Image (spheres, coloured by chain):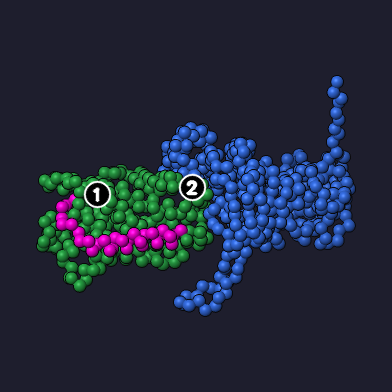
Amino acid sequence: MEKNIAIKAENISKIFKIDKGLKSLSFFKKDKSEINFYALKNINFEITKGDAVGLIGRNGSGKSTLLKILGGITYPTIGKANINGSCSIVMESGIGFHKDLSGYENIFTQGQIMGLNKHYIKNKLDEIINFSEIEDFIYTPIKHYSSGMVSRLSFSVIALLSNNILMIDEVLGFGDIGFHQKAIRKMKELHENGRTILTISHNLNDIITLSNRILVLRAGELIADGIPSDIIPNYIEEILLAKYKKEITTQKTIVKNIITPENNDIYGPNEIKLLKLSFADIKNLTPVQFKINNKIEIHFSLNIIKANSDWDFGIIIRDITENVIFTTSIKENKFISFSKNGIYNGFCLLPANFFNVGKFFIYPYFVNMIKKEVIPIKDFISFRTISIENSNNEINKYMGPCRIKVEWELENKR
Amino acid sequence: MKGNNYKHFWSLVFNLAERDIRVKYAQTFFGITWMIVQPIISYFMISFFFGKLLRVNQQITDYSLFAYFGMMAWYYFSYIVGYSGISLLQNQDIVQKTNIPKLVLPFSKAFSGLFEFIIWLTVGILIFFIKGNHPDFKFILIPFLIIFNMIAGLSIGLWLSAITIKYRDIYHFIPYVIGISIFITPVLYPVTMVPENIKFIIYLNPMAGIIEGYRFLILNYEMPTYKYLYGLVALLIFFLIGIYYFKRTEKKMADLI
């Protein structure tokens, strides 16, 4: 293995034998209904020293299994994991912790389990306690700590790991935003000090911050390997979504072009109801796509039950991570009122050259500025945007939900 | 593996042993005092129930101490067998989520039991002195016996810990095995009471040799026969095979547990 390679996976496969039938109570196993389950299938990659790699994939895709193999917790059925240098692997927060012992005592247990020397830990003790922000309670048994405190304490020991390779499995996902940012910054610092880090996370922002390279696993296979700006837009589902097999129940992947409530009682307050929301020209189950330089036309149909009420109708645009991008409503710019009862049809145009490539969701809502009430509708329609060239090979250097034209200028240096 | 060396192995063993001891006495009222009181009470219980009531002590000069040191060694042995036997199952999180050598876990139990053992040993020797006896040069050899005592427990404990991961029911046999072992070891009775044709079982039992060894070194009993050496050599071989077997199954432990 070359000297500058930190981690090398060679044809790694991990096969588990799963019993298909009921376990027989008799002494002899009559039916051998075992199947081979490939948790990992032929994984090959190399990680250079100093890389920061993010490992993403849905639950059950094999990420943790791969990490366990690389970290030496378990072994591949076929193939080999090569590690060049000392490595620390963190699969769980609070490893080795015992609830009856104090934070102070648990620091030593966890630190030693992670490969730190007792004297090293002693020297760094103040640093650890400071970082964890636990100070006063450090001698109290950890059974009295809040879960956030336990996570902070555990992470503070991790933060001081000195090994050259650090592998982390979703240990960064705990509570308090302030500490979370601190933890991410610390990880970045560890990387900048020359360490190779490999992180598994479902948090998009963390992955972007902590990786200069991303590996994507799906059902045990390595399906993508590249830089974040390439990978993230194309594999966003892999980062955020749940079980691979249960796509049907995952709202975000089904195609939804139209809202036509049968019982529209819940689609609005008493005075106004939503009858229909859709894109223009839809063919029922085909995903709707727009080029990013096209406007997006949205049709709607409202039933005004009480004329001249103060209710306004609008839509919320969200990206695939559920973040709101913007909201817009009918009565925003023009003075419009529903002066008569009955059905009103209308449309709105979302601007061209605004959205980046990706998938977006439109949620209808009603708002009453006088009564100060908002009724969001828990239903949506979704659309995809594609780039103008419409090629999948294009390197996507744009990140974020929007892609807007910004004017840049340089002044000549005198 | 992967950067851990011998020094770190032992450092982990001691840290985990220390953790066990601390946990045992965290939040207790009597703490270590109880650890000292226990052997003293046991001494009196043994000397009364077995010495006076059951009258086992026909040919033995000081039955109470005779039996006490037998109990001390056997108790340490059974502690190691029991606790190291379940050490892996009890620490599933460490087995499944860290890359420390799993051998650390059963070994750490041998050392957490050592703490209590030393207290028993000290109390026993003090009682010996109180009764008007004197120390002997032979005392220097006691640590060797302790190591053999530890190996005796570990050789069974290692096998058990590795096997019970896959076959959980073996775990339930442990208390029975330990219970039987006190009968086939001369803990409470002298070897002289065993009929000649069965004596070889005793000689093959390494704990028998170890216990007779304690009685020889501390209480000045007669030197145990060379026949015990068969058992001790068998013990060492069994122990080394145990480590080998453990290491072989270590690779699969994280998957099976």
**Crowding near pointer 2: few (<14 within 10 Å), some, many (20+)?**
some
Q: Which numbered disc flags the more N-terminal residue, 2 or 1? A: 2
Mark 1 lies on a secondary structure that is helix
Which hue belongs to chain A?
blue
Q: Chain of mark 1?
A: B
Disc marking residue B4: 2
- The residue positioned 81% from the left and 52% from the top of the image is A393
Q: Which mark is residue B141?
A: 1
Question: Which corner quadrant of the image does residue B228 belong to?
Answer: bottom left
Give coordinates of residue A39: x percent, y percent. 61, 61
Q: Is residue A352 above or below residue A244?
A: above
Chain B, chosen colour in render: green
Q: CA distance from mark 2 to mark 1?
A: 32 Å
Decide whether residue A206 is among the magenta residues: no
Whether the magenta-drawn stretch holds residue B223 is answered as yes
In the rendered image, the vertical position of residue A408 relative to residue A28, given as above or below = above
**Left or right of residue B107: residue B221:** left
**Would residue A224 be found to the left or right of residue A189 on screen?**
right
Q: Which range is magenta?
A: B218-247
Q: Amino acid at mark 2?
A: Asn
